[in-house]
Amino acid sequence: MGLPFWLRHPRRAWRIVRATRAIQGELMMKSPWRSRTLWVNVLALAAMAVERYYGSNLLDADTQTAMLAVINVVLRLVTRQPVGLV
């Protein structure tokens, strides 16, 4: 009968495993509503709208933009799953 495929061809078997994991990763997308990045940006938009409505200027626009950019980069670095729109 012989050895199983994965013992006869370990490199090919490992390539198949990696490809399968990549496909599963693409299929395992999370809902946009579970995205921390989406919620941070929604809260930032709401904070800007409230600030404009009430006329308070706690932070200037450049500081707000820089802070939001840094937060988005950090969230992007810790992201594990892609967001699906379907």
Image (cartoon, rainbow, N blue to C red):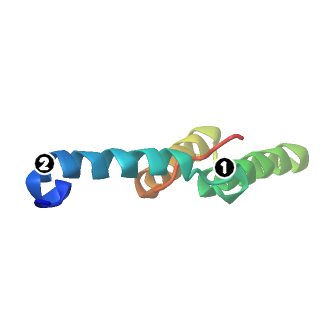
| Residue at figure coordinates x 12%, y 50% from the top left | 9
- Name of the residue lying farthest toward the front: 1
- Residue 57 appearing in the image: no
Q: Is residue 41 visible?
A: yes
Asked if residue 22 lies left or right of residue 29, the reply is: left
Q: Which quadrant is home to the C terminus? A: top right
Closer to the camera: disc 1 or disc 2?
Answer: 2
Residue 1 in the image: above or below residue 23? below
Q: Which mark is residue 30?
A: none
Which residue shows up at 63% across the image and 55% down it?
35
Find residue 74 and report its horizontal and vertical position in percent. 44, 54
Residue at the spot of label 2: 11
> Which one is in front, 84 or 58?
84
> Callout 2: 10 Å neighbours few (<14), some, many (20+)?
few
Find the residue positioned furthest to the right: 53
Q: Could you say where residue 71 lies in the image, as x and y percent from the top left?
A: 51, 53
Which residue type carries mark 2? Arg
Instruction: Write down the residue under mark 1.
Output: 38
Q: CA distance from mark 1 to mark 2?
A: 40 Å
| Label 2 residue SS | helix
Residue at 39% x, 46% y is: 22
Between 15 and 65, which is closer to the camera in this rendering?
15
Quadrant where the N terminus sits is bottom left
Q: Earlier in the sequence, mark 1 or mark 2?
A: 2
Residue in view at x 64 percent, y 39 percent? 61
The image shows residue 81, relative to residue 61, as above or below, that is below
